[in-house]
Amino acid sequence: MIRTRRTGRGYALRGAAVVAVLAMAGVTAGCKEQPATGASAAPSAPAGSSSPTDDAKPGGSASPSESAKPTEPATASPKPTASSTTPTADPQGKVLMASGSEGKQVRELQARLRQIGHFDRSPTGYYGTVTVAAVRSFQGKRGLERTGKTDTLTWQKLLGMTHEPTAAELNPPTTRPVAEPDKRCLTGRVICISKNSRTLSWMIDGKVVSSMDVRFGSQYTPTREGTFSVYWKSRHHVSTIYHTAMPYAMFFSGGQAVHYSSDFAARGYNGASHGCVNVRDEGKIAALFAAVRTGDKVVIYK
């Protein structure tokens, strides 16, 4: 930047402008996560992306081993009075799951709804706003009251129209469906990355070996698109600009790399990088890092 000092006659230039900053500050500069507020905020997530209000469990993803929480608090029975009447039973039965529920049964509900086109993402095990909308859609199509809660009748109708979800349907590799690979990904060893689906697929000779969720730079520090190659791997890399950890870094374009992000793991898409491709599953990026060789292709497309 240009520095100035004040004199009695106003501001005068102290010296000549510093030479232009090199792009991404060289190969060891790396990138850092940006908060979701201010000038560096990430662009709004596309429909179906994960956040605490749309079925990603607040504070982290729901584990498939978690048991479903009660959805309706117990209330004391009203004391009979002279004018009291017998309450009318809910025609759709007992509520089994509702907003805020989590666990295996919610994951199964989401998988079954997805089978018949009412849930457009991978099961999370958390009953958020997307699940509420999906249940309402299903109820409306079947002539049921559109409560958004999964009651006995809704559940029975859903069971009758769907099959028991497979392990892959219950626990798919990414929260969003993996995109159709770009044609550049169909030959050789390729890290194939889709910005639209926010997924990365490790492919060998056109076959998907593994897939994972990823996020990118903001509109002000975008992740570059095109065909690249991995020119350097750094297992315990630390950014020389931001002094933040970039584990399992695989550099493909200047200071931009594919690497694990603890911030992504904690906050999901409520943030962005300074251009790198963030991976939130440490186990998957560790396996990818071990498999990828220097010189392997990287394709980033929309």
Image (cartoon, helix red, strand yellow):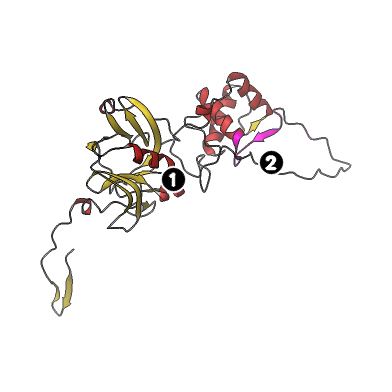
Q: Which residues are magenta?
A: 83-104
Horizontally, residue 232 falls left or right of residue 58, namely left
- When asked about the image quadrant of residue 185, the answer is top left
Q: Is residue 104 above or below residue 74?
A: above
Point out the tag, 2 or 1, that comes first from the N-terminus: 2
Q: Quadrant of the N terminus?
A: bottom left
Camera sees residue 281: no
Q: Nearer the viewer, residue 80 or 24?
A: 24
Numbered label attached to residue 83: none
Q: Mark 2, mark 1: which one is toward the viewer?
A: 1
Magenta-colored stretch includes residue 89: yes
Query: Which residue is painted at 26% across and 28% down in the image?
Result: 188
Q: Quadrant of the C terminus?
A: top left
Find disc 1 in the rendering and name its residue: 268
Horizontally, residue 136 falls left or right of residue 72, namely left
Find disc 2 in the rendering and name its residue: 72
Can you give x and y, in whole percent of width and height, for residue 239 in the image? Answer: 30, 55
- SS label for mark 2: loop
- When asked about the image quadrant of residue 284, the answer is top left
Residue type of the residue flagged with mark 2: Glu
The furthest residue to the left: 16
Query: Which residue is painted at 89% across and 42% down in the image?
Result: 82
Q: Nearer the viewer, residue 137 or 116?
A: 116
Report the predominant secondary structure element of the magenta stretch: loop
Q: CA distance from mark 2 to mark 1?
A: 29 Å
Query: Which residue is painted at 42% across and 30% down in the image?
Result: 177
Can you give x and y, in whole percent of width and height, for residue 295 in the image? Answer: 23, 37
Residue type of the residue flagged with mark 1: Gly
